[in-house]
Image: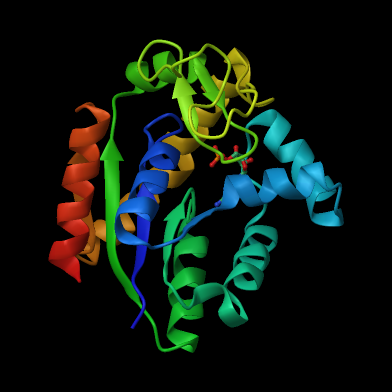
Amino acid sequence: MATFVVLMGGPGAGKGTQAKRLERELGIPQIATGDLFRENLQNNTELGQTARKYMDAGELVPDEVTIGMVRQRLSGEGRSQGAIFDGFPRTCPQAEALEALLAEWGEKLAVVLYINVRRDVLLQRLAGRWTCPICGRVYHVLFNPPKEAGVCDVDGGKLFQRADDTEETQRRRIDVYFEQTAPVLDYYREQGMLVEIDGEQSIEEVTESLVAAIRDAT
Ligand code: AMP
């Protein structure tokens, strides 16, 4: 059976950074709904056009759109190596839909990992965030700078700041997270699936804690 893991945490908690590290360490691919939406925006697909206004405002894209996109991503060969879900599920209906989708294919979630970071630390982190357009690696001007300013260490990509990383949208995304996504944590906690990780440790320590929790669960 393939391994399916959910990574949870507020915007800026380090989900993207950690998902990439886990992907390398464990060979389980990252599925980031935010990245899938951004790809659709770039390619100007119908889905991208639908998602744009929500993303620009820092609001969640409607559940049926998001769930449809994940279903498509997991169809066929798309799930043979399992997945590290990053930024999905963000609402209880999405969590229920994920469970149903996996059950349809005789699979289930191994564990849900919550990278816990305080709200003021999230805001600080989002303010200095830069992303590589080629490989999706995430840097921070202070906490995780690239070797050469503005350039990806791995592939030389020219780093950019996400359009939704403006201060107002950042605050809204953090509010949306605490209002709409916190209930998903309770949902998984009640099912005994949630493992909480201290997200204010160093990047390496967070990875080690996550790897240990995944190994424990599989
Ligand atoms: P992220 O890259 O995970 O911060 O996501 C960027 C934006 O994409 C969010 O602010 C939402 O507008 C949208 N988005 C990503 N994942 C989801 C999801 N699971 N449900 C609804 N909207 C999402």
Measured as percent of width and height from the top left, residue 122 is found at: 39, 22
Q: Quadrant of residue 41?
A: top right
Side of 11 relative to 133 (left or right): left
* Residue 182 in picture, x, y percent from top left: 37, 44
Toward the viewer: 147 or 122? 147
Q: Which residue does the image show at 45% across and 63% down from the upper left? A: 95
Of residues 195 and 21, the one nearer the viewer is 21
The answer to whether one can see residue 51 in this image is: yes
Point out the quarter of the image occupied by ligand 1: top right
Left/right placement of residue 177 relative to residue 168 reads left
Q: Position of residue 119 (x, y in %)?
A: 35, 22
Q: Quadrant of residue 75?
A: bottom right
| Quadrant of the drawing holding the C terminus | bottom left
Check the image and report above or below for 27 versus 121.
Answer: below
Q: Does residue 198 appear in the picture of this structure?
A: no
Number of residue marks:
0
- In the image, taking residue 218 as reference, residue 182 lies left or right, namely right
Locate residue 205: give its quadrant.
top left
Depth check, front residue: 195 or 132:
132
Tell me which residue sits at (35%, 42%) in the image.
18
**Depicted 95 relative to depicted 55: above or below:** below
Which residue is rendered at x = 48% and y = 87% of the image? 105
Q: Residue at x 49, y 54 (%)?
A: 88
Identify the image quadrant of the N terminus.
bottom left
Front-most of residues 39 and 183 = 39
In this rendering, the answer to whether 2 lies above or below 122 is below
Q: How are the colours assigned in the image?
A: rainbow
